[in-house]
Amino acid sequence: MTHIYKKLGAVFFALLLIAALAACGNNSESKGSSSDSKDEETITYKAENGNVKIPKHPKRVVVMADGYYGYFKTLGINVVGAPENVFKNPYYKGKTDGVTNIGDGTSVEKVIDLNPDLIIVWTTQGSDIKKLEKIAPTVAVKYDKLDNIEQLKEFAKMTGTEDKAEKWLAKWDKKVAAAKTKIKKAVGDKTISIMQTNGKDIYVFGKDFGRGGSIIYKDLGLQATKLTKEKAIDQGPGYTSISLEKLPDFAGDYIFAGPWQSGGDDGGVFDSSIWKNLSAVKNDHVYKIDPIGFYFTDPISLEGQLKFITESLTK
């Protein structure tokens, strides 16, 4: 009888051991599933091209809209592909390692090879958006809908990196405050102009179209000329086009100027007698901007632009 009880006990113990091992296996599988689901977790983001399901934690982003590259880098997001302009921006030196150059930013084929889990495009990329949506979740962004600070906050909200955005903004405010003190002491209430030329065409910029305008007129609070304020700040898309003959009416005491693109023809303006007779030119208060570096409005580029503006106006 005792022998029978021993056998039953052994069987019972074996059954308990099997059940325990099965439970452990189930828990292990459950944990694995939880981890997998976390990696694949999505959120619904309201973009210009509709509601888009995107990864909550994107790991392979292709930024086809070149102007937004620096935002994602600032937020610590892994960017695997970006357009050629990104690699020409002097302020991105050392910040494009491991990123693939996808050319002019319109090639769908080059994007496929990068296996992205999120794609960022301009709204102007039209029919290509539909093709890209078949590759990965695609978010279309309108260039001038938000200013640079609000755009940073929006991307941070989209990717769950608000803490990194706030950290950068706090540092930025300190840098601006320090620069403002130096610059105000150097230039006082003198006027500042921002211009780019394309042949004999001249574009005068305000505060909302890149070219360092948000820094000069918003962050630093420097003065624009009367006509710049009327035509490029208080109205229009953030810039105005003027003729060479109108140049003296828009030119400030200090001018940040450059060609429309690197290697562009700017002789039509800068070689003219009208240009050479401007007070800013005669007083050596003209500072040549990099047309690509000053095109961008992201945090990395803003830092480079602020440094250039500060050094130019206080030297």
Image (cartoon, rainbow, N blue to C red):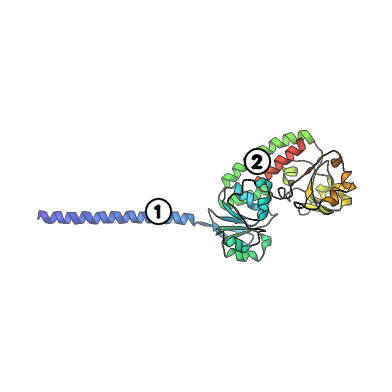
Q: In this orientation, which residue lies closer to the viewer: 205 or 257?
A: 257
* Quarter of the image that includes the N terminus: bottom left
**32 lies left or right of 290:** left
**22 lies left or right of 78:** left
Q: In this orientation, which residue lies closer to the viewer: 263 or 18?
A: 263
Residue identified by numbered label 1: 31
Residue type beneath disc 2: Trp
- Residue occupying the point 60% across, 45% down: 165
Q: Position of residue 157 (x, y in %)?
A: 58, 51
Q: Is residue 114 above or below residue 184?
A: below
Rounded to the nearest angstrom, the CA distance separating label 1 from label 2 is 41 Å
Residue identified by numbered label 2: 172
- Residue occupying the point 69% across, 35% down: 178
Q: Position of residue 13 (x, y in %)?
A: 21, 54
- Residue occupying the point 75% across, 44% down: 217
- Residue 299 visible to the viewer: no
The residue carrying pointer 1 sits among few (fewer than 14), some (14 to 19) or many (20 or more) residues within 10 Å by Cα, namely few
Which of the marked residues, 1 or 2, is nearer the chain's N terminus? 1
Q: For mark 1, give the secondary structure.
A: helix
Q: For mark 2, give the secondary structure.
A: helix
- Residue 272 visible to the viewer: yes
Q: Are marks 1 and 2 in contact (CB under 8 Å)?
A: no
Residue type beneath disc 1: Lys
